[in-house]
Amino acid sequence: MVIDPFSLTGLLVLAIFLIGMTLIVFEAQLEMDKFKPAMFMMSGLIVIGAHYAFYDPNGFQYFLQAQNEIKEELFGLIAFMAFMWMVVELLNERNVFTALNGYLMRKGLGARSMFWATGALSALLSPFLNNITTAMIFGKTVKSISTNQRYTHISLCNIVVASNSGVWFLGTSTSLMVVLAGKISIAGLLLLIPSALIGWLLFAATLHFFYLRKLDGQALIHLADQSETALKPGGAGLAIVGFCAVFGAVLCNVLLKVSIEFAIGIGLGIVALYAWLLMHRGIELPWQDQLQKVEWNALLFFIGIITSVACLNHVGWLSYISRLFEVMHPTAVNMVLGVASGVMDNVPVEAAALMSNPDLGLNQWALNALMVGIGGSLTVVGSAAGVMAMSLDKTYSFAVHLKFLPAILVNFFGSLGVWYLQFELLGLY
C-alpha cells in the first residue's frame, strides 16, 4: 500500500469520490448529466500528485505506473463502446430498429403480448446492442402504444430488467469490463445464458401475474402511427452485414484470441465499407455523420468513474474489498456487490471489484458479472437502462421502480439460484 487510506490524502480522495457519487445518484433530480460529476471525480489524481510532490517525491514512480495502467484499461473499454455505438448508429439511420418496432405494432398484438414481445426482444438483443440501446428502442414502442400510465410503468420495468439480463455477452458495461480485465472470456460469459434468461423469465412471469393482470378490463394500448417505420433502402443488407461483423468479431476473439475491441473495430470497418458501397450505388446514406453520433457523455462518464476508482485503489481503500473475499464466502460478497450496484451504479462497483483483484475462479467471476449486471435493476438509477427509462417517461421515477421490487428480487435470486445449480451443484463450466 503506497498511501495510508486514513491519511489526509486518502480521506480527501474518498471525499471527492463520495461527493461525485452522490451527485450521480441524484442526477435525475438535479437535472445534471452524470458525466459532469464523474469528470470532477478525476481530481483525486491532483490530490495524489500533490501528496507525492510535498511528502514523497520518490513515490512518483508508483503514481506514473498507476496512470499507465488506467490508460491501458480505458483504451479497451472506450474503443469497444465507441466502435459498437457506431455500428448501432449506422443500423439506426436505416430504420432497422424502427422497422422492428413497426413490425410488432403491425402484428396487432394485445397489451399482454406486447409486454412479452418487448421484454423478450430486449433480453435477446441487449447482449449485442447494449442495455441502453434496447431500453431506448422498446421503451419508445411502449410509449407510442400505451394509453395507461400503470401499463407503461410495468412494461418499462420489464424492459429495464430484460435489458440488464444481457450480462451473458457484452450487453452491459460490467460484463465488458470483466472480459477486458482478463477475468473471464467471452465463452465463459456465454455460460451465463441459463442464469440470465431464466431469471428474467421468472421476473416477467411474476410481473405478469401479480401486476399486469390487475389491469384486466382497462384500455391499455392503441395502434400507433406507423408511417415512419419503413425500412430504408439498403437497411436489410446493412443489418445482415452488421450481424455477421459482430458474430465474426466474437469468433476472432474466441478462436484467434484477437482482443474484442480490435475485433469489433474490424467489424466496424466492414460495416462502414458496406455503407460506402451503398452510397456509391446511389443510396443516400450519410454514413460519416452516423459514425460521429457516439454518446460521448457516456464515454466521459466511464473515463471519470474508472479513474476515480483507480485513485481509491491507489490510496488503499479497495484493499478492504479484497479482504471481504477472504473473510466471507465469495458468493456472499458477490451478492453484496450486486446490491451495491443497484444503490450507486454498476460501473464503479465493478471497477472496484476488478481493481481490488481478488483471487477468484471462473465460477465466481461469472457470478460477479451476473450479480453486478442484474443488480443494477434493483433501483432505477443502478443501470443505464433505468436512466433511459426515466428519460423516456418523466413519471417513471425512483419510487415507481421500487413498487416492482418484489418482482425484481425474483429476478435477482432466481438468476442466483440457476447459477448455483449450474456452477456449484452440477459443475457445468
Image (tube, grey):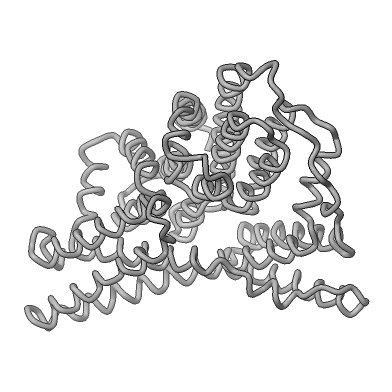
The location of residue 40, given as percent across then percent down, is: 31, 69
Q: Which residue is drawn at 30% across and 50% down?
A: 358
Comparing 42 with 167, the one in front is 42
201 and 192: which one is in front? 201
Q: In this view, does 24 lie above or below 148?
A: below
Q: What residue is at 49 percent from the left and 49 percent from the top?
A: 387
> In this rendering, does residue 370 appear at all?
yes
Q: Position of residue 229 (x, y in %)?
A: 82, 52
229 lies left or right of 303: right
| Snapshot quadrant of residue 300 | bottom left
> Residue at horizontal 38%, vertical 40%?
338
Indicate the quadrant where residue 118 lies.
top right
Q: Where is residue 29 in the image (x, y as percent from the top left)?
A: 39, 50
Residue placed furthest toward the right: 281
Image quadrant where one finds the N terminus: bottom left
Foreground residue among 128 and 26: 26
Q: Is residue 13 above or below residue 179?
A: below
Across and down, in percent, residue 144 comes to: 71, 43
Give the side of residue 136 with respect to residue 424, left or right.
right
Mark yes or no: residue 259 visible.
Answer: no
- Horizontal side of 314 relative to 228 (left or right) equals left
Which residue sits at x=31%, y=38%? 333
